[in-house]
Amino acid sequence: MENLVSKIRTDLNAYQTHVSEKLIDLRSQGLISETEFKKIIVDAQLTAKSIIDGLASQDKYTEKATEIYVYSLLDKYRNKIENKIRKIEEKQKVIKFPGKQGIIEIYFKNEAGQLIIPDKMDREIAETFLENVLKIPAKSVTIVVGHLIRILKIRLEEKKGHHFFNSNAYTNKLEQEKKVIEMIYQEFGKFIGQIVDGEYPDEDKYKYQNELLEEMVKVAIDRQNLNQGFLDKLFSILNSKLN
């Protein structure tokens, strides 16, 4: 039993050290406040104490039964702490973007669908592009980042309470504008990837970034304008019938 007790204490101390280092790193990045930091540390210490108390209460049971019981407590402790840390980490992966219709959340994901922290240049390209071309009421934007691909998907804000916002004409208009933005971003995705992942000096990277953004915005606006005349005419006709 002494060997088991020693092993459990060693594993618990190792995990406590891991949690402490992780929280110190999050605090240094400004992702958690001093109050949050202390609260999680205290919670961790109290939970660790309950594990040690649980170990002491098992002296009348077999070593195997004690091991199963105490490690089940340790697993619950790990899950509780990991969930707290995961929520803190995910906060930094959501970008709040001031869109034309209000705050829009931007999510970057890898090809496996996991939230990621984007490269600074990836974020700058996305925000500048959307700032210049996104006029529709979007709720959120998701960008999938892969090798030489960038796939952008817009989730539209739901508008209710008036037939104007619920009409097929209005919905079709929004969907067309949405598709233009999504298609342009995907078409330029290869070039975005080349710049972000390329081994260029920073000065050249920003030069290429600015040139790419200028072209992306120009193409998007040109294509939006190309569709706009027809869409406005169709929208006007269909809307007048609804009224």
Image: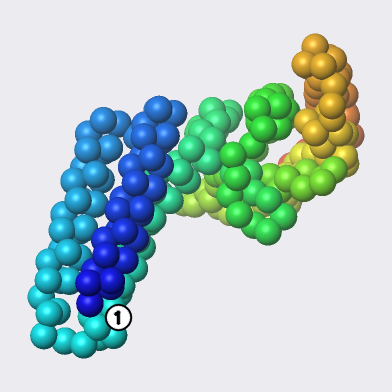
> Does residue 203 appear left or right of residue 62 in this picture?
right
Placement of the N terminus among the 4 image quadrants: bottom left
> Which residue is drawn at the image coordinates 44% and 28% (left, top)?
29
Q: Identify the element where label 1 is drawn.
A: helix
Near mark 1 (Cα within 10 A), the count class, few <14, some 14-19 or many ≥20, is few
> Which residue is drawn at the image coordinates 67% and 32% (left, top)?
119
The answer to whether residue 108 is seen in the rendering is yes
| Residue 11 percent coordinates (x, y) | 34, 60
- In this rendering, is residue 8 above or below 103? below
| Residue 104 percent coordinates (x, y) | 54, 37
| Residue 197 percent coordinates (x, y) | 80, 33
How many marks are shown on the rendered structure?
1
Q: Which of the two residues, 187 or 198, is positioned nearer the viewer here?
A: 198
Residue most extreme to the top: 203
| Residue 125 percent coordinates (x, y) | 72, 28
Query: What colour scheme does the image use?
Result: rainbow
- In this rendering, is residue 34 above or below 23? above
Q: Would you identify the image quadrant in which residue 23 lies? A: top left
Amino acid at dot 1:
Ile
Q: Which of the two residues, 207 or 156, is positioned nearer the viewer here?
A: 207
Q: Would you identify the image quadrant in which residue 213 lies? A: top right
- In this rendering, is residue 60 above or below 99? below
> Does residue 99 appear left or right of residue 218 in this picture?
left
The answer to whether residue 69 is seen in the rendering is no
> Which residue is drawn at the image coordinates 88% and 29% (left, top)?
219
> Which residue is drawn at the image coordinates 24% and 83% (left, top)?
63
Q: Which of the two residues, 156 or 212, is positioned nearer the viewer here?
A: 212
Query: Which residue in the structure is indicated by mark 1?
Result: 68
